[in-house]
């Protein structure tokens, strides 16, 4: 059977069109929000790291809490928040992107525990704008609760802290400290995230032993170091660092460790970005590696208003803030963004939790030696816990001293 030149030409045209469409396909809503969240994660890392201290936080939790808040922001306040958080201005793209991520994280039937929850605490009697309330419920699955901040004031932090503790397996007990809430508070937007997962291949407790961990100031401490010999991992050696990925059961989440070479920690930190992280992940290949990492556990609380202001989110904290998309009852501003995170890494796996509260007050109120590759993390390193299928960074930090809680 002869095939006409016209048929061949039509077939080639179709193939070229399909190829062009794939090359120029628009990123999904989830991808755009994930990319923005990850850029925000690296921006925030550079503002919260200090001296030789450990650091740990959930950029995802902070993004979600602020993502809910931006739903009620208008004009310059909205533009500054979206720019700082690298989120799309298009409401539909941003809202469906967050909804997709939250749905994936809360998916049932997993071999690990991973959940996130949102709750909005509103001054009793305050009327929310219908569009704002609808978005919180539909896109962020946020539960609305009433509290009488005007009368109860400080006491209102008790039910909020209890909710956070219940949604983080009691790992974040007292998120909102004393004097953070008062009679001028009108709304608190909260997010909680909890993770507990086993390594795909657990570390043998028999191989754990006390070894030296070399600090940034050239001193050393003795800590329990876990070992896994001749294990298959994604691995990359760059000019200044070794990068290793350790998957959890089910292969849906993993921890990526970035281990700078001796004397190169500052250089590696300075080079980190969302784009560089993507390049490193694409360059990683399957290798057989002897892995040595310390057991560690610590927590960190962050008051983020000043940091976010430095990053470009300025008007939201002032009396000219525009959150008129939330309510017409009273003009509001952000008084504080509070974040706390906890992590424990041992032979079985990892447990991590975090919570974020965005406190809104009325304006003009008071503020308150073998061929086998060696990955030996016996010196400070950076670590990232990500959702592999979505690519979203859930937790991020650095370990400077395993003995510091």
Image: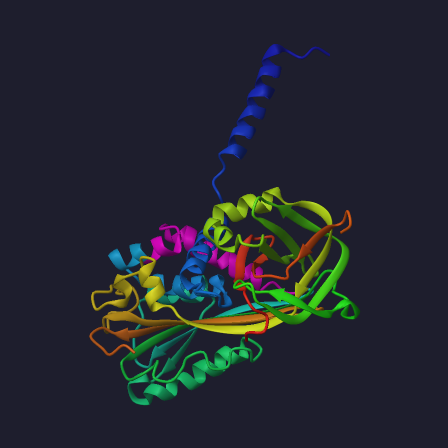
Q: Is residue 107 magenta?
A: yes
Pick whichever, 145 or 286, lies toward us: 286
Pick whichever, 219 or 86, lies toward us: 219
Q: Is the residue 186 above or below the residue 79 in the image?
A: below
Q: Is residue 130 magenta?
A: no
Which image quadrant: the N terminus? top right
Where is residue 58? Give x, y as percent. Answer: 50, 65
Where is residue 211? Give x, y as percent. Answer: 69, 68
Question: Is any atom of residue 28 visible in this view?
Answer: no
Q: Is the residue 30 above or below the residue 187 in the image?
A: above
What residue is rendered at 54% in x and 61% in y?
A: 103
Q: Main secondary structure of the magenta part?
A: helix
Where is residue 365? Give x, y as percent. Answer: 22, 77
**Apparent side of residue 25 relative to residue 314 in the rendered image (left or right):** right
Pick whichever, 29 or 39, lies toward us: 39
Outermost residue toward the front?
Answer: 218
Where is residue 257? Give x, y as percent. Answer: 60, 57
What residue is rendered at 52% in x and 33% in y?
A: 23
Tally of marks: 0
Pick whichever, 327 or 339, lies toward us: 339
**Apparent side of residue 376 relative to residue 258 in the rendered image (left or right):** right
Q: How is the image coloured?
A: rainbow
What segment carries the magenta color?
Answer: 81-108
**Apparent side of residue 41 relative to residue 115 in the rendered image (left or right):** left
**Apparent side of residue 227 relative to residue 220 in the rendered image (left or right):** right
Which image quadrant: the C terminus? bottom right
What residue is rendered at 24% in x and 70% in y?
A: 328
In the figure, residue 81 lies in which quadrant? bottom left
Question: Is any atom of residue 31 visible in this view?
Answer: yes
């Amino acid at each position: 059977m002869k095939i006409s030149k016209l048929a061949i030409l039509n077939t080639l045209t179709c193939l070229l069109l399909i190829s062009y469409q794939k090359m120029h396909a628009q990123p999904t809503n989830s991808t755009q929000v994930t990319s923005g969240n990850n850029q925000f994660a690296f921006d925030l890392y550079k503002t919260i790291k200090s001296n030789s201290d450990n650091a740990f936080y959930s950029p995802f939790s902070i993004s979600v809490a602020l993502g809910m808040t931006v739903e009620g922001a208008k004009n310059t306040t909205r533009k500054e928040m979206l720019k700082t958080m690298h989120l799309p201005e298009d409401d539909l793209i941003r809202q469906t992107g967050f909804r997709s991520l939250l749905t994936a994280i809360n998916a049932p039937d997993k071999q690990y525990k991973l959940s996130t929850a949102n709750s909005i605490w509103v001054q009793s009697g305050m009327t929310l704008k219908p569009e704002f309330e609808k978005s919180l419920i539909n896109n962020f699955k946020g539960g609305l609760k009433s509290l009488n901040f005007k009368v109860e004031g400080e006491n209102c932090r008790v039910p909020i802290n209890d909710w956070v503790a219940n949604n983080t397996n009691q790992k974040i007990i007292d998120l909102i400290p004393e004097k953070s809430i008062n009679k001028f508070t009108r709304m608190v937007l909260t997010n909680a995230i909890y993770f507990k997962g086993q390594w795909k291949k657990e570390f043998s407790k028999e191989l754990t032993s006390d070894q030296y961990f070399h600090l940034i100031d050239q001193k050393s401490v003795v800590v329990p170091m876990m070992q896994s010999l001749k294990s298959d991992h994604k691995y990359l050696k760059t000019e200044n660092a070794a990068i290793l990925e350790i998957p959890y059961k089910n292969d849906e989440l993993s921890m990526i460790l970035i281990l700078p070479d001796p004397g190169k920690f500052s250089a590696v930190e300075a080079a980190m970005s969302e784009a560089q992280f993507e390049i490193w992940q694409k360059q990683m290949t399957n290798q057989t590696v002897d892995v040595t990492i310390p057991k560690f556990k610590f927590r960190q609380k962050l008051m983020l208003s000043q940091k976010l202001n430095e990053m470009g989110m300025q008007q939201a904290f002032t009396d000219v803030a525009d959150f008129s998309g939330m309510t017409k009852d009273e003009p509001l501003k952000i008084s504080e963004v509070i974040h706390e995170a906890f992590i424990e890494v041992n032979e079985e796996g990892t447990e991590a939790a975090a919570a974020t509260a965005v406190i809104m007050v009325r304006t003009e109120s008071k503020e308150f030696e073998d061929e086998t590759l060696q990955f030996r993390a016996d010196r400070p390193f950076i670590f990232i816990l990500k959702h592999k299928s979505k690519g979203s960074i859930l937790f991020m930090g650095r370990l400077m001293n395993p003995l510091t809680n």
